Amino acid sequence: MLRYIAKRLVFMIPMLIGITIISFIVIHLAPGSPTDLQTEMNPRVSAEMKERIRAMYDLDKPLYQQYLSWLGKLVTLDLGNSFATDHRPVFDKILERIPVTIIINVLSMILIIIVAIPIGVLSAVHQDSLFDKITGVFVFVGFAMPTFWLALLLMILFGIHLGWLPISGIRSLNYEYLAPGAAFIDLVKHLVLPVLLSAFGGLAGLSRYMRANMLEVIRQDYITTARAKGLSERVIIYKHALRNALLPVITILGLSVPGLIGGSVIFETIFAIPGMGQLFYMSAMSRDYPVIMGILFIGAVLTLIGNLIADVSYALADPRIRVA
Amino acid sequence: MKAILKSEFWYRFSKNRLTVAGTILVILLFVVSFLAPWISPYDPGEINLRMVLSPPSEGHLLGTDQLGRDVLSRMIWGSRISLKVGFVATGIAILIGAVLGALAGYYGKWVDTIIMRFVDIMLCFPSFFLILAVIAFLEPSIWNIMIVIGLTSWMGITRLVRADFITLREREFVQAARAIGASDFRIIFIHILPNAMASVLVAATLGVAGAILTESALSFLGIGVQPPTPSWGNILTAGKDNIDIAWWLSLYPGLAILITVLGFNLLGEGIRDSLDPRLRN
């Protein structure tokens, strides 16, 4: 198993190089340059000055040289310095933004699992029942729902009409003066809507997937055998069938990582949450190349790690799969 | 036409009430966007500063926006944007996906390896990040959005077409074509590809829905279709800006997106189930 993991980790390297090359090309070949935003509005900036600014950021060098020097610094975990006026290291900038994003995504992943799996199982076991039909409609609507719109509606309902939940940021203004318990509740209140909404997209998909798996499993011969042995329906469903139907779900969860990370741009912008998604949005707007590259890189690393964890836990959970 | 109506496909297609509902929704959307100049009660760009942010009333059925423009008229014209983006973006995705999938599946070996590794890499990007990065650099326009959404959503189609090609290339009709000396190009595009179109059609219908969702999200974030051109996404931006006073700006455009996407999804699933009942889940 350890050898398998090591092999997969090594295999990640060419993938990451491919990903960074594509990102680099896409970002640098797009028209316009980061210096435009600083200089275009200023009539006193001469062409020569523009060139000097470009040289300062190494933007005058050939693309492959820029890429190689970026890659060289990456080996020492240096993602360069931001083009923004603070010129801080990209690594630090991302590091201070990442916890919020990961907390929200992990919480919503947990929410997806504990809600979608029971729904999927129940609607498979009671196929064509009223419950199955209602959740079927819910799933269809869920697939078609623009989640940013749902966010707006929930903000109007819970934030403005009922006034139960705050609609922006992750802390209240008086956060520092709150007692530890009250501060925690304050944080929870701020996270309820973002977590709920980022879970929403995955809910429909996973519950439908779980239902399909379960339907397939309960038609298998070994379930018939279990019935023939006279086991109770509960044991058959929750012990024999569920375990087998759960296996492929692991893979799906691994594959949903990029979607969750991508979605964080929308939620963090709507709810003004200072996470990685919001940083990405702001950097893209101001053409902060190093930060954009850094986030695309880290997003890809998180995705690859998500896939690896999924594959490894699949192999651990299913003895039929031998990794050598 | 008669042959289609009598076919098994049509029988299954018209039997499913949800599929029929989806088809009606899609047709309705086409009709509305086609008739936009005649059915919208106001000019979508007509500013009326005396009617700023007025709630739904008899004069303005869905209310007005922050410049006093009629929301219903803007939504009717916005349907044109959604359909355009949905179809052009999906068209681009099919073109890339079908060609790459065909090459990978037909030639196999290193061609397959290179193309599929490229697909794997593209799937590793949180695609919304990639779209955002490119769009933010380009001038935000409807054409750029179509192209970028198309360029980032072909991977699923590549996988489908490749899988079809791998089974189809061994079939007798392909061997027969090869035996009479047909070129690879002819075999791939004239003989095999039409047989792989069924799964592409399903993926394309669902792809239109996805592209419409992505466009509305981009326009909502202010980097998609730019005002004054009306799109459902950018009306919602105004809804967010006036969230505490004008609920109608937030409610109706989103409902339009939801219903449209629902329509295309139902249609896509309906086509899939009717083409091959074994694929049902």
Image: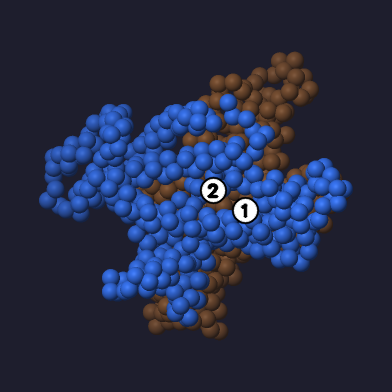
Q: Label 2 marks which chain's residue? A: A
- The three-letter code of the residue at mark 1 reads Leu
Residue B223 lies, in percent from the top left, at 40, 56
Q: Quadrant of the C terminus of chain A?
A: top right
Question: In the figure, is residue B81 to the left or right of A59?
Answer: right
Helix, strand or loop under label 2:
loop
Q: Which residue is mark 1?
A: A206
A112 versus B199 height, above or below? below
Which chain did the renderer colour blue? A
- At x 43% / y 65%, what residue is drawn? A191
User: Quarter of the image holding residue B53?
Assistant: bottom left
Q: Position of residue B44 (x, y in %)?
A: 48, 69
User: Considering depth in this image, is B56 or A302 the residue closer to the camera?
Assistant: A302
Query: Compared with residue B174, is residue B71 higher up or lower down, i.e. above or below?
Result: below
Question: Chain B rendered in what hue?
Answer: brown
Q: Is residue B69 left or right of residue A202?
A: left
Q: Is residue A79 above or below residue A107?
A: above
Question: Residue B253 in the image: x percent, y percent?
Answer: 53, 68
Residue A249 shows which numbered tag?
none
| Identity, as a three-letter code, of the amino acid under mark 2 | Ser
Q: Which residue in the structure is indicated by mark 2?
A: A256
> Please, is residue B221 above or below residue A5 in the view?
below
Query: Residue at (42%, 44%) from the top-left corner?
Result: A299
Which sits earlier in the primary sequence, circle 1 or circle 2? Answer: 1
Residue B39 visible in rendering: yes
